[in-house]
């Protein structure tokens, strides 16, 4: 936990401090050692949120890109009574969950169902094979328009466990390396939209600066209609190509020629 209540104010952990958990109101103490990032821990009990995980520097750095009032937002289901603490929730109701460690697929699905309007941000520096996979498969990303890409084989570029989420996923291959780099693939945040456009994954390349500036300003980072719009374009192009492949030959209609829609 990054923030706890001390004298009624949400503050970061500091040496020797005690505070109150904003969610369950139990006592927490500041953990300010040299091996782990400074944080608050519940006193004598497990964390009140079953989804809580130890934070890495990467995790904390992303949270700090947003105003403190957006961080560690307590989301409460009034019907079921279920309560969880979102990493970030903007004033437009958009939740961001920053994920470094391995996540059980059942918990991933549960989080998506609970938060609803959310985006995953995944640290792709944890496993050594993630970035080499992107470099090997990058030629399969077909650029379309304005930083949008299509690929029928997203597993050739991105971690398989995140490819069928019901919410968008951002793949971050930079980690904490924010220095100047000539590698555009590492410097790009790869935003995978849920669903498929006629069998193609729709991916948008964002700069970290674009993400941080746009994320707080809208309820959807990128419209969910984007996938459906691309699917419609693909169908229209396929129909157009099919019509063009039929040519009258002396009163006989030629059979269709096999063609791949081009964009």
Image (spheres, rainbow, N blue to C red):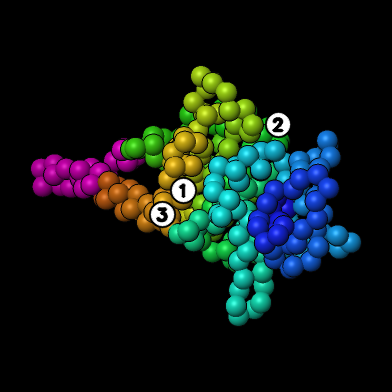
Task: Return the x and y of residue 18 as percentages of the image width and height.
Answer: 80, 55
Kindly state the secondary structure of the residue where label 1 is placed.
Answer: helix
Residue where numbered disc 3 is placed: 218
Per the rendered image, the range of residues in magenta is: 240-263
Residue depth check, mark 1 versus mark 2: number of the one nearer the observer: 1
Horizontal side of residue 5 vs 230, given as left or right: right
Task: Return the x and y of residue 138 as percentages of the image width and height.
Answer: 51, 30
Distance, label 2 to label 3, CA atoms, is 34 Å
Residue 262: assigned label: none
Horizontal side of residue 103 vs 88, given as left or right: right
Which residue of the protein is positioned furthest toward the left in this rendering? 250
Q: Residue at x 33, y 53 (%)?
A: 229
Nearer the observer, 176 or 151: 176
Task: Return the x and y of residue 263 as percentages of the image width and height.
Answer: 31, 38
Residue where numbered disc 1 is placed: 215
Q: Earlier in the sequence, mark 1 or mark 2?
A: 2
Horizontal side of residue 199 vs 107, given as left or right: left
Residue where numbered disc 2 is placed: 128
Q: Is residue 246 magenta?
A: yes
Answer few, some or many: residues within 10 Å of disc 2's Cα (few below 14, many 20 plus, some between 14 and 19): few
Nearer the observer, 203 or 81: 81
Distance, label 1 to label 3, CA atoms, is 6 Å
């Amino acid at each position: 936990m990054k923030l706890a209540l001390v004298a009624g104010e949400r503050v970061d952990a500091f040496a020797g401090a005690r505070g109150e958990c904003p969610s369950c109101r139990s006592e927490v103490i500041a953990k300010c050692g040299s091996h782990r990032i400074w944080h608050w821990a519940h006193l004598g009990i497990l964390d009140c949120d079953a989804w809580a995980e130890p934070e890495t520097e990467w995790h904390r750095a992303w949270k700090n890109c947003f105003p403190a009032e957006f961080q560690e937002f307590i989301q409460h289901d009034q019907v079921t009574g279920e309560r969880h603490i979102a990493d970030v929730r903007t004033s437009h109701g958009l939740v961001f969950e920053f994920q470094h460690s391995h996540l059980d697929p059942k918990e991933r699905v549960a989080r998506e169902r609970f938060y609803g309007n959310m985006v995953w941000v995944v640290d792709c520096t944890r496993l050594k094979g993630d970035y080499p996979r992107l470099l090997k498969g990058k030629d399969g990303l077909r650029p379309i328009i304005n930083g949008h890409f299509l690929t029928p084989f997203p597993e050739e570029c991105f971690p398989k466990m995140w490819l069928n989420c019901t919410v968008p996923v951002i793949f971050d291959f930079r980690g904490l390396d924010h220095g100047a780099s000539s590698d555009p693939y590492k410097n790009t945040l790869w935003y995978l939209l849920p669903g498929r456009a006629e069998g193609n994954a729709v991916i948008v390349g964002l700069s970290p600066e674009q993400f941080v500036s746009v994320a707080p300003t809208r309820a959807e980072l990128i419209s969910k209609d984007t996938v459906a719009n691309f699917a419609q374009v693909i169908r229209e192009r396929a129909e157009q190509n099919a019509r063009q492949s039929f040519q009258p030959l002396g009163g006989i209609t030629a059979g269709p020629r096999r063609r791949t829609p081009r964009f």
